[in-house]
Image: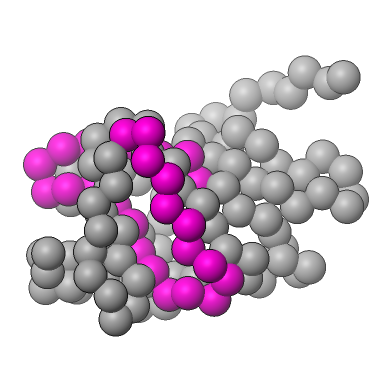
């Protein structure tokens, strides 16, 4: 067994997010054949990711607030505390907080063979796309 030190909270970059978003890493690969990544992500009201996809998919579990999640071409889905949503590999999507409240979720995914190819970041979500509910 190995007790791991807590990683510091970091603010996510504006190239990939709109608004203030903070991440606390929880789990990262410890051995060469491991892929699991888990983070606690907190979104300020109105904050959201840019459109993006994951090579091996992504699972989001909401712990507080209400998450807004949308797949490209789909409708915005509201995900409440205790609920989980899965975005399959390659599916372009975004997720974020409602306009009036903070939101927190666990983000769980597996790294791609090349960890740099795990997430493909795309264009920012426009205000119109965000407001379309």
Magenta residue check for 100: yes
| Residue drawn at x 54%, y 76% as measured from the top left | 90
Picture coordinates of residue 27, whole percent (x, y): 66, 37
Q: Specify the quadrant of the image occupied by residue 25.
A: top right
Measured from the top left, where is residue 39 in percent x and y? 54, 40
Q: Is residue 120 left or right of residue 47?
A: right
Depth order, front residue of 123/11 = 123
Above-or-below relation of 130 to 85: below
Residue 48 drawn at (x, y percent): 29, 56
Q: Quadrant of the N terminus?
A: top right
Q: Is residue 52 above or below residue 99?
A: below
Residue at the image point whose x is 29% and y is 81% from the top: 73
Residue 114 visible to the viewer: yes
The structure residue drawn at horizontal position 37% and vertical position 41%, both measured from the top left corner, is: 83
Q: Is residue 94 magenta?
A: yes
Task: Give percent across and percent down for residue 5.
Answer: 69, 22
103 left or right, relative to 24: left
- Magenta segment range? 81-107
Q: Is residue 22 visible?
A: no
């Amino acid at each position: 067994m190995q007790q791991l030190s807590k990683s510091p909270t970091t603010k996510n970059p504006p190239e990939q997010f709109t608004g203030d978003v903070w991440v606390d890493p929880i789990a990262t690969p410890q051995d060469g054949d491991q892929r699991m990544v888990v983070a606690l992500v907190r979104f300020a009201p109105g904050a959201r990711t840019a459109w993006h996809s994951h090579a091996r998919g992504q699972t989001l579990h909401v712990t507080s607030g209400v998450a807004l999640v949308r797949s490209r071409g789909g409708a915005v889905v509201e995900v409440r505390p205790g609920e989980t949503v899965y975005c399959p590999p390659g599916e372009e999507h975004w997720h974020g907080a409602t306009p009036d409240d903070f939101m927190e979720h666990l983000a769980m995914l597996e790294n791609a063979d090349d960890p740099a190819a795990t997430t493909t970041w795309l264009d920012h979500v426009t205000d119109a796309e965000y407001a379309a509910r």
